[in-house]
Image (cartoon, rainbow, N blue to C red):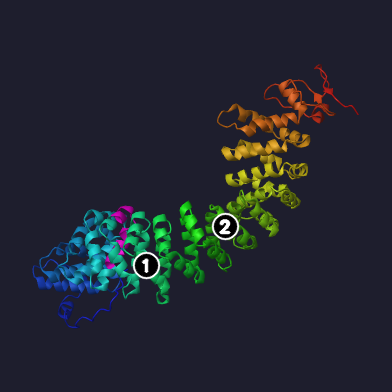
Amino acid sequence: MGKKVKKEASPPKDVFDPLLIESKTPATVVLMLSSPENEVLAKACDALYKFASKGDENKVTLLGLGALEHLYKLLSHEDPLVRRNAVMVFGIMASNHDVRKLLRELDVTNSLISQLAPEEDVVIHEFATLCLAYMAVEYTTKVKIFEQGGLEPLIRLLGSLDPDVKKNSLECIYLLVQDFQNRAAVRELNVIPPLLGLLESEYPVIQLLALQTLEVISKDRETRILLGENKGLDCLLNILENNELSDLHIETLAVLGNCLEDVHTLQQIQLTGGLKKLLSFLEVSTVPDIQKNAAKAITKAAYDSEIRKILHWEEVEKFLLSLLDTNNDEVQVAASQAISAMCENIDSKCVLGLQGIPQLVHLLSSENEEVKEAVVTALTNLTTANPRNASVVAEAEGIEPLMNILNAQRDGAISNAIAVLTNLSLQEPFRVSIQSHGIMNALVGPLRSTNSQVQSKAAFAVAAFGCDADARTELRNAGGLGPLVELLHSKNEEVRRNACWAVMVCGSDELTAVELCRLGALDILEEINLSRKRKNKFSEAALEKLLDNNLPQKYSRMGYLSSSNIITNGFYDCGQIKHGGKFLSLEELSKQELTERRAIIFINAK
């Protein structure tokens, strides 16, 4: 900010020299601002402008001398030259933070806005807009400019013949439209045509600012419609087709990216062949920022089902898959996220699965943690409710790298890797293969995680793989039952439900059921089932399963067995225990001394 667009003509060397010689210190010049003579005032202002132009230290000096308070009064001076020179000092000094603070206290915005009238001198326009642009960085000033009617003259000055006035006005508008209220206001004031006109400016800085402003305001649907009506989409596509304007391509794509989020606008682009042009441009671009931003725009747009259909018709999948081959981590992350979003479309999911899964599996070995997380998330979306894609992951030798990701640093990567493995487990050959890689052992760490998403996925996976007796033994031997039981205490409903489900599945054999009971699962489940809010269908089923596979404890707790409960060797009756009392194992009972209490009945047919 503050750099001139056009080259400034050198001022005559001798114009203010007499004054500078007479006034050896800035303090003296500041005193002259109280002079009744117009010529003295004009020359004093000019001297202060030159002094302030030399650096920030000089601006602070003038601030301390009280120059601003005097200059503020001169903003409404009847002499045009005095007023012009006073505005110039304000414009140059406003680059300093402390100066801006005082300008806000003096409430100069109204006076500056009044300097933007059409009949005012172009230099006044230049420095008044410069000062406003510096001040518009702060939110309170944005509000004042809006309330005091500053938007209309600023938009009008976009048509100024002076490039510096255009640039400063544009910069001010760009800062103002960061606020939603101002975005709506500039739209009402018909800002789109002048902004589109500035895209043809001979000054790159003005073109860039115009695009950046369009990018902000095109976040609103109404503005996107106006862009279409004003042939703005054609203007933007023309910039992309012009290699000489390659410096503007990233910002141009940002505006078009916003337009992709609107079905109506996207249909317009499609009907005129603009979408094909856009994708063709993207497919040949090798600029990482363009590739990354394009993928991000597709991700945002793909949240709408109609837009996903349009993007699929235009074969956006081909572009996204090409991005996976780039040697840039940020591009690979953005492409993977876009693939995840496009998976919501069934046809896209099939195309991306068959062609993209081998590439994604390869990227699971990336050294970049963010890439791994984005890739494995894409694989989760591709394999959920899609057995064919799950098969492609296994065929691409994805099981081992997925297992490795269970030790990744990012929780998102771990939870999604578990999800993919769980999706694969629905097919028997893959479940056996994953089990042979030691899945239960690998899940112990995630079960101990403090992240609820990881806990939930890990418990769900235990339920999926725990249907196999060897897998249950592996989990028991690896010490995984303890952290699983701890998850029953979770305040997170999904974690608690999945933990109950896992306990129900693991309680299918006597050894595991007995161990779960020893770890306190029964007491926790009973407590859960007493709460209307916390209990679920799995908590009730888990309790029943544990008792059915640990008959001594069931008989001790309930006082009865069901007709389906068959007593075998090892059953014992130690009498009914009180609620909250500890159920002792045979080994613990055998170590107790004899008492007068009734004998413990133990069945040992052998």
**On the rendered structure, is 602 left or right of 40?**
right
Q: Is residue 518 found inside the magenta-colored segment of the image? A: no
Residue 323 horizontal/vertical position (percent): 55, 66
Q: Is residue 541 above or below residue 432?
A: above
Instruction: Determine if residue 49 is in view.
Output: yes
Task: Tell me the residue at 29%/57% (across/down).
Answer: 187
Residue 34 horizontal/vertical position (percent): 12, 66
Closer to the eye: label 2 or 1: 1
> In the rendered structure, which amino acid carries the disc numbered 1?
Asp
Residue 603 horizontal/vertical position (percent): 85, 25
Point out the image quarter for the C terminus: top right
Q: Is residue 302 above or below residue 508?
A: below
Q: Earlier in the sequence, mark 2 or mark 1?
A: 1
Instruction: Determine if residue 56 is in view.
Output: no
Point out the image quarter for the N terminus: bottom left
Helix, strand or loop: magenta stretch: helix
Dot 2 alpha-carbon crowd within 10 angstroms: few under 14, some 14 to 19, many 20 or more = many
Q: Is residue 179 found inside the magenta-colored segment of the image? A: yes
Residue 270 versus residue 421: which sits nearer the camera? 270
The magenta span reads 168-184
Considering every residue shown, the one lying at the far front of the view is 271
Q: Which mark is residue 429?
A: none
Dot 1 alpha-carbon crowd within 10 angstroms: few under 14, some 14 to 19, many 20 or more = some
- What is the quadrant of residue 27 in the picture? bottom left
> In the rendered structure, which amino acid carries the disc numbered 2?
Ala
- The residue that label 2 is drawn on is 374
Q: What separation in Å lies between label 2 and label 1 (alpha carbons)?
A: 34 Å
- The residue that label 1 is drawn on is 234
